[in-house]
Amino acid sequence: MLKKIISLSIQGLAAILPLSLTLYFIYWFMTGAESLLIPYVPQQYYFPGLGILTAVGVFLVTGLLVNVYAVKWIVATANRQVEKIPLIKSIFGAIRDTMTVFKISEKDSSKAVVSVEIKPDMHLIGFVTADQVATELFKQADKIGVYIPLSYQIGGYTLYVNRSQVTKLDIGVEEAMRIALTGGVKAKKT
């Protein structure tokens, strides 16, 4: 009887935890955005949701500006200066690389998600990264860089493998990342 109660409790937790955490994250983001804005907006102009609208507007304007040549030059110059500071450059580089590792253009999207054959009948799901790094590191070999995420944690490995070990998969990046990060566990759709 006790095992049944524990089993049902775990099933209930598994059913509500993903949605609860997602809703909490949205609530946390929204209240954080609102609390940052409230001190700077007169009370008569403030309405709930203004912080979110402002954040979206700032992201949109920033996205538009970084495509302007002068702003691109300023950002590139600032990045070069930050990359000269010893400890900061490591943190900055890691964050920048993380933000760009899955930025895949339309022409490259067909080769983004791949299966890497580690040995016969053993495969890992990965994401093709910059080919030019593999070419620079392994000049005589036909290697390709593939990022292999670790399950249930943030992190992973970049493997440089022979192109013959890589097979394109016909799934999207989001679905492949979900499979890789959850260890292949797929929730039943209700």
Image (spheres, helix red, strand yellow):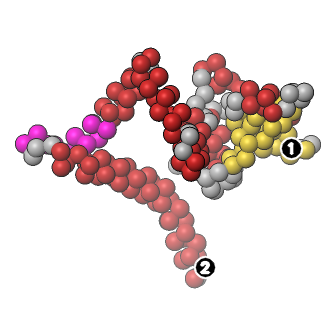
Q: What segment is highlighted magenta in the picture?
A: 44-55
The residue shown at (22%, 40%) is 50
* Residue 59 falls within the magenta-colored stretch: no
Q: Position of residue 101 (x, y in %)?
A: 62, 36
**Does 170 sit left or right of 139 as displayed?**
left
Q: Is residue 3 visible?
A: yes
Q: Which mark is residue 3?
A: 2
Q: Secondary structure at mark 1?
A: strand
Q: Which residue is mark 1?
A: 118
Separation (CA) of disc 2 from disc 1: 40 Å
Given the image, on which type of amino acid does mark 1 rest?
Ile
Is there CB contact under 8 Å for labels 2 and 1? no
Q: Nearer the viewer, residue 125 or 14?
A: 125
Residue 41, given in percent of the width and then of the height, sits at 15, 43
Q: Nearer the viewer, residue 3 or 110?
A: 110
In primary-sequence order, the first of circles 2 and 1 is 2
Horizontal and vertical percent position of residue 58: 32, 33
Viewer-nearest residue: 78 or 65: 78
- For numbered disc 2, what is the local secondary structure? helix
Q: Residues within 10 Å of mark 1 (few under 14, many from 20)?
A: few
Q: Amino acid at mark 2?
A: Lys
Looking at the image, the residue that sits furthest to the bottom is 2
